[in-house]
Image: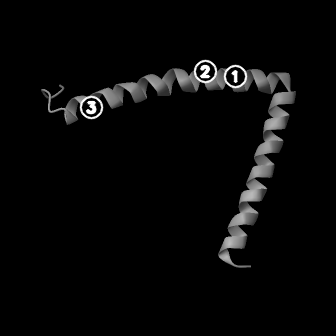
Amino acid sequence: MDGARARTAANIILLTAGAAAAYVVITTPSLRRLAGVSVRWWLGASVPLYLLLETRRAWVESRGPALR
């Protein structure tokens, strides 16, 4: 098996495993609630941090005064 076929096989296996996991999470109410809470926590933490870092990067690239 060459590299391209191995990569394709691995991608198919990962896609199948991801679809199976999504099906289990969607059809199990407790896992669905856990996934919802996890997504809210992730978005609540990562999006504001990303915006803060991008704002700082834009400020520095605009050659504004240094942030302290």
Q: Mark 1 = which residue?
A: 36
Q: Secondary structure at mark 2?
A: helix
The residue type indicated by label 1 comes to Gly
Estimate the spatial distance between the alpha carbons at disc 2 and disc 3, rounded to whole Å.
27 Å
The residue type indicated by label 3 comes to Ala
The residue type indicated by label 2 comes to Arg
What residue is at 79 percent from the left and 27 percent from the top? 31
**Extreme residue toward the bottom, this view:** 1
**Extreme residue toward the left, this view:** 65
- The quadrant of the image that shows the C terminus is top left
Estimate the spatial distance between the alpha carbons at disc 1 and disc 3, rounded to whole Å.
32 Å
**Extreme residue toward the right, this view:** 27
Above or below, comparing residue 24 to residue 49 in the picture: below
What residue is at 14 percent from the left and 28 percent from the top? 64
Above or below, comparing residue 40 to residue 15 in the picture: above
Q: Secondary structure at mark 3?
A: helix
| Residue 34 horizontal/vertical position (percent) | 73, 24
- The quadrant of the image that shows the N terminus is bottom right
Above or below, comparing residue 3 to residue 53 in the picture: below
What residue is at 80 percent from the left and 32 percent from the top? 25
Badge 2: how crowded within 10 Å, few (<14), some, or many (20+)? few
| Residue 63 horizontal/vertical position (percent) | 14, 33
Which labelled disc corresponds to residue 68?
none
Badge 3: how crowded within 10 Å, few (<14), some, or many (20+)? few
Q: Mark 2 = which residue?
A: 40
Q: Mark 3 = which residue?
A: 58
What residue is at 66 percent from the left and 75 percent from the top? 3
- In the shown orientation, is residue 24 left or right of residue 64? right
Residues tagged 1 and 2 counted as in contact (Cβ below 8 A): yes
